[in-house]
Amino acid sequence: MKLTSSHLADYLDSLEKSHREDVERLIPIFSLITGYPPMLWGSIIGFGHLRYTYPTGHSGEMPLLSFSRRKTAITIYLGYDAEALLNDYSLGKYQIGKGCLYIKQLNDIDLSILKEVLTKAKNTLLAYDFIKPL
């Protein structure tokens, strides 16, 4: 994943009104939890900048936490084991993938619980020995 030179304002202007409202509600939450401003990584809004190097030697860069507003859902990238991160929480209506949380609309979830999940995801990622902040 690579940082892009696109401007966040241009990205926001390209979104449907309801999608933009979701993004504008999430940005301050992610900024508060990570301590970083939003940056575009393609069509993903990322916060923070990490470098990972696996024992195999494979390496790359990624944001600490990130999300994207896709056509059918908000995708929140939590890291490597979304299911384990969500075990102890009653977030609301969502689906999960290996490292992602999918939410149709923000009103389907409890935002205070989302903040707890994001904090746990951030702390979990930073605890891995193969990930270093840049």
Image: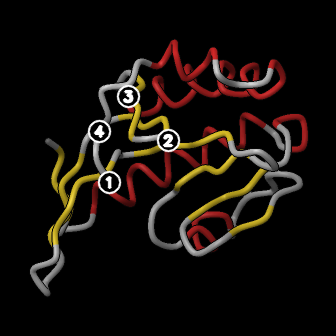
Which residue corresponds to the image point at 79% horizontal and 52% vertical from the top-left? 91
Going by the numbered disc 4, the residue's amino acid type is Leu
Disc 2, disc 1: CB below 8 Å? yes
Which residue, given by chain and number where applicable, does mark 2 sit on?
44
Q: Tell me if mark 1 has few (under 14), some (14-19) or many (20+) residues whose alpha carbon lies within 10 angstroms of its own.
A: few
Q: Judge from the rendering whether residue 61 lies leftward or rightward of residue 74; answer left or right.
A: left
**Quadrant in the rendering for residue 37:** top left
Q: Which residue is mark 3?
A: 39
Q: Secondary structure at mark 3?
A: strand
What number of labels is visible?
Answer: 4
Mark 2 falls on what kind of element?
strand
* Residue type at numbered disc 3: Met
Rounded to the nearest whole Å, what is the CA distance between mark 2 and mark 1?
Answer: 10 Å
Q: Label 4: how many residues lie within 10 Å, few (<14), some (14-19) or many (20+)?
A: some
Judged from the image, the secondary structure of the residue bearing numbered disc 1 is: loop
User: Going 52% across and 57% down the picture, which residue do you hit?
Assistant: 78
Above or below residue 81? Residue 133 is above
Q: Position of residue 118 (x, y in %)?
A: 54, 46
Residue 21 in picture, x, y percent from top left: 76, 19
Answer with mark 2 or mark 3, whichever residue precedes in sequence: 3
84 vs 46, nearest the viewer = 46
Q: Which label number is shown at residue 3?
A: 4
Structural distance between the alpha carbons of marks 1 and 3: 12 Å
- The CA span between labels 2 and 3 is 8 Å
Left or right: residue 51 compared with residue 106: left
Front residue of 10 and 33: 10
Where in the figure is residue 88, as x and y percent of width and height?
Answer: 69, 65
Check the image and report above or below for 25 versus 48: above
Q: Residue at x 42, y 37 (%)?
A: 46
